[in-house]
Amino acid sequence: MTTVHKYIIYVLLLIILIDRYLYIYINMAEKGKIGIIGSGLIGQSWAMLFASARYNVTIYDINLELVNTACEKIKTELKMMEKNGILRGNITAEQQIDLIKGVTNLEEVVEGTILIQECIPEVLSLKQQLYDQIDKIVGSQTIISSSTSTFLPSALSEKMEHRNQLIVSHPVNPPYFVPLVEIVPSEWTEDWVIKKTRAIMEEIKQSPVTLAKEVPGFALNRIQYAILNECWHLVNDGVLNVKDVDTVMSEGLGMRYAFLGPLETAHLNAEGFVNYTERYSNSMYGVCQQFKPSPKFEGPLVKEIGDQLNSNTPLEDLPKRRLWRDQSLIKLSQLKKYNNY
């Protein structure tokens, strides 16, 4: 090998090394700060999602013990997921852990934050008190995002000076493995807040949908409640027992809906959606005329359904069943990732 050949090889190796270090530097560069208010399971999930996309994450709670416990749980979860090959993002668990810290000072979590993700309990007065505190210290370019599944953004923000910066980003439990996020603005939420929130959710590899206007229950719960209403009536009218009702979903509709929504399902079940309605609209309408008013989910049937569910999954087995659910969702999310049409 000549000196020229050696020189060329050295230059090529140097180029490869420089390219590698540039890649690492670019991917590890600080992307800004995300604040998480509330250190429970949803807050922990959000923290891991943002860290997976290389954001600096600050978790806030009123009690230092709660914050420390959350950080330890996150550390354990990230290492476990890395070991099992299901860690999100393109940096290591240790690198993600280094991006997360906990505080008990509200100003510290709000200051200089791109987006604040609120995850405190579903009590309207508590949330409004928190937003009143945030309102006094937040900057004009910080998105104030709530994880609420219950309250409209207008109800949360109506008395705020910075109400135009508040939006709902409602996740689905567990958010780390179920990517849907419902983005719900109020009538006064500014357009840049809506667009930037969606862009951030897409960046952390969630699957956002943006509601054009706020409606009670948002989208997911409105659909979920419609299903639960009919499930209640099928049991109450003695048509099916609880186990068989759940089987209709888990072994029937749910298998399709894991990959397709109900509208595309109809589209594929005929020669397109227009043809589907031509074939089935009359029979669908006839069945729907037999639907009963929405139940209140109270009375003796509550205990009857609870007893049937407990016979299959006793209350003491709920943690084990939840773990099985989460592991199944992991497998499903991996299947969906590698089987996109």
Image (tube, rainbow, N blue to C red):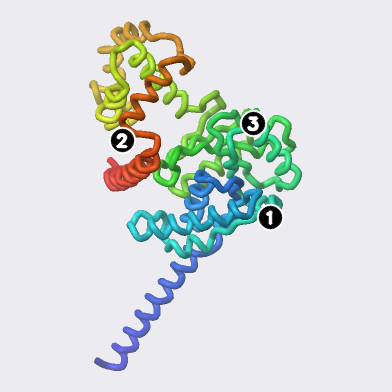
Please tell me whether residue 286 is drawn above or below residue 45 in the rendered image. above
Q: Position of residue 165 (x, y in %)?
A: 65, 39
Question: Which residue is the site of mark 1?
Answer: 108
Residue at 47 percent across and 49 percent down: it is 203
Which quadrant of the view contains residue 144?
Answer: top right
Q: CA distance from mark 2 to mark 3?
A: 35 Å
In the rendered structure, which disc, 2 or 3, sits on the residue that comes first in sequence? 3
Question: Which residue is the site of mark 3?
Answer: 124
Question: Which residue is the site of mark 2?
Answer: 259
Q: Position of residue 47 (x, y in %)?
A: 52, 51
Q: Nearer the viewer, mark 3 or mark 1?
A: 3
Say whether residue 55 is left or right of residue 259. Answer: right
The local secondary structure at tag 3 comes to helix
Q: Are marks 2 and 1 in contact (CB under 8 Å)?
A: no
Say whether residue 36 is left or right of residue 282. Answer: right
Check disc 1: other Cα within 10 Å, few if <14, some if 14-19, many if 20+.
some
In the rendered structure, which disc, 3 or 1, sits on the residue that comes first in sequence? 1
The local secondary structure at tag 1 comes to helix
The local secondary structure at tag 2 comes to loop
